[in-house]
Image (cartoon, rainbow, N blue to C red):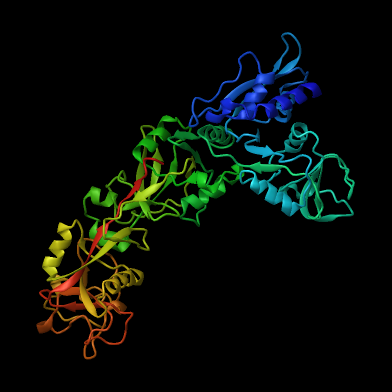
Amino acid sequence: MKAILNSLLIAILSVLAHPIQCHLKMDTGLWAACNQTGTSAGFKPRSSFDSTEGDKCTLAFNVAVRDEEDAREFCALYAPWRLVKAEIDLKDRPRVLCHVEATLACKKGWIQMFGSCFRVPDEHKVAKFPEAQEMCKAFDGGAIASLRHKYIVGVWRRYFRGVSQIWVDASETWHQYIQKTGTVDGDAFAIAFTGKHYDFSVHPNSLIRIDPNIKLQVLCEYKPEMTAAEINYLGRRYSEIYYPSVKVPNGILVRSASSYTTSTNNLEVCKKALRPYMVDVDEVGPFVAEDPILAEIHTTNLPFTLLTRSGARARVEAKFMQDKYCHGSPKDIAMRFGVDVPNSNAGSFVLTNVPGEIKCDNMKSAAIVHAKDAAKLMIMSDSRSLPIWCKLGKKIKFKVDVPPNYSLFERANGEFVAHRLFTEELSFDKASKRCKDDGGFLSGVNDLNEANKLGALAELAGLNNAQMWLGGKRREACWDVATDFNSDTNPCSRNRVIQWLDNVAQDFYTDWWRNGYDHRNPSSKPNQIQKCLTYVQGKPAWADDNLSAFLDDIECYYPRAFYCTKKVTVLKDEQS
């Protein structure tokens, strides 16, 4: 067996620089091992880098084992790729057949083991722990080798012969196995393959924690780029333990056993659910419940009928939906639901397949109904307690096309809008028409941050003491009614008298009004009603010193500059 392993290792190392590997996306280590000890079936490379099946080979070892469990343990030690099946062959002589798959592809000079790539930069060189870290970083951005698998130490020792003691990284789960040296104990982890060193003596293969200034040999590791084959493998393993996984473009969906009811962020929950698989956070993406994905879920023939969480949430305030959309068209309501897009300037991805038959008290989120005929979305009051579908695979990228000359702004409710200041002075009605001709509407404001954004646009244009039209107008019912300054519920109170037009905003607060030195806004005398809303920049002659307030109502015929706004739609980048 030792001779077989030695020849296998020599073959792997000697062909890593073979010119045929320069243009093929495959794992060089398995290719070499298969040429040395593979069966007559030979090496079967993946059809492409994006194939859901990796490079495959059946490695044959002339060794006798007791049962299939022994065969699996043998294959884990001597064939450390993804094990598909371990087989005992007794036809001619006792031997073990290890059917393995290289789901990932390691760079030239690195050996794939249990889903990571390993390399000894120089077996004759020793280094202190900080020096070892720098050595690994210099080799393709690697790191100190990490203890990730129960067989990994035995595999390292067999594949990297001549290496006696190495620096390693270890999580808390390995701390129970630490052996004290009694002489140089410290805070840096190492594996003592031989157990013998000039500065300490322990049992062979001991995990020790020693002074980082001791000099040991170096074993480096890096996690290769995620592939469709690796994603497929992880999905199979997940399906063995929990629920069947679902293949989708660029990855798989896995279902969590439960949800975190205190969290509304699907992505954070999924990162926690998939943490045991040690995948990079960039490989865990948001699940967008579009019709083709729902169809894939349904055709998988999942052995259960239940509800799961889609991640789609209503993008506007409940009070606004009750006022505007309880009796609106289904299409208008459906457009109000979206899935959050993290760490981007995209805000939320809008779903258009949410059904419109709703009631006013159940519009907060959308869940997936896994029924016999189809998997489909259903509006619910709150779906946070349901299990979650998590996407593992190539990260979906989202894009947002900002109109030319417009500035993007993210609202607190996840909605993205774009604003533009037009400096030409028009009446309210003409300004409104000008915005609509440009494909937008007179702008609205949802909070102080958005107001400050508009102020910055005015300052940039040199309008330092001016008023610009916004898309708000006094309610028609209040045209001949004095403003009620003592109530928050009267339709003509300070926070209700103005109505945002064309759905450009939803909120309004009394402290946004900018008062004059001799009056309070909005206008309150029936014979002096001013109907149209402006944004106040700087300190006009009539205004008080409260620069944090920014609204005034004036007659609609005055020529003023104006703000236009456009809703911004989030799209999936088809190239991602």
Q: How many marks?
A: 0
Residue 22 location, x and y as percent?
56, 30
What residue sits 25% from the left and 64% below the top?
A: 420
Residue 214 location, x and y as percent?
82, 52
Q: Is residue 460 above or below residue 73?
A: below
Residue nearest the observer in this picture, 103 or 473: 103
The answer to whether one can see residue 25 in this image is: no
What residue sits 11% from the left and 67% below the top?
A: 429
Residue 423 location, x and y as percent?
19, 70
- Relative placement, left or right, of 521 versus 37 is left
Residue nearest the observer in this picture, 276 or 417: 417
> Which image quarter holds the C terminus?
top left
Considering every residue shown, the one lying at the far top of the view is 92
- Relative placement, left or right, of 503 versus 168 is left
> Which image quarter holds the N terminus?
top right
Considering every residue shown, the one lying at the far front of the view is 19
Q: Is residue 361 above or below residue 120?
A: below
Q: Image quadrant of residue 63?
A: top right
The answer to whether one can see residue 6 in this image is: yes
Residue nearest the observer in this picture, 257 or 145: 145
What residue sits 32% from the left and 72% below the top?
A: 456
Residue 498 location, x and y as percent?
21, 72
